Image: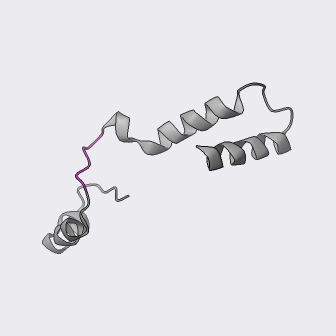
Amino acid sequence: LFQQDCSSPYIAAISRACLEATGALPWPASSPDLFLIENVWDAIRHAINTPALSQNQQELCENIQAAWVTS
């Protein structure tokens, strides 16, 4: 996953050629549907709150790790 802004190192011809050679797909700027980490955190939040809330910090950490592995 490559995510970049419009700073000069990313838009240089050699950088664009390298990305094209690797088959990188275009990534629309500011597309809320493509902010993967937000979707991941939403899935984890849902997983750790179902069926019951964590009772302590250790249990919360274990539930987050389990949700991360299965998401």
Q: Residue, x 83% and y 41% (percent of image)?
A: 59
Q: Quadrant of the N terminus?
A: bottom left
The image shows a total of numbered marks equal to 0
Q: Residue, x 40% and y 41% (percent of image)?
A: 35
**Residue toward you, 14 or 71:** 71
Residue 41 locus on image (x, y percent)? 56, 39
Q: Most extreme residue toward the left, as rendered?
A: 13
Residue 27 locus on image (x, y percent)? 26, 49
Colour setting: one colour
Is residue 29 one of those drawn in magenta?
yes
Instruction: Identify whether 12 is placed above or below 57.
Output: below
Instruction: Identify whether 44 is placed above or below 9.
Output: above
Residue 56 locus on image (x, y percent)? 86, 37
Q: Residue, x 24% and y 60% (percent of image)?
A: 7
Q: Which residues are magenta?
A: 25-30
Magenta span: predominant SS is: loop
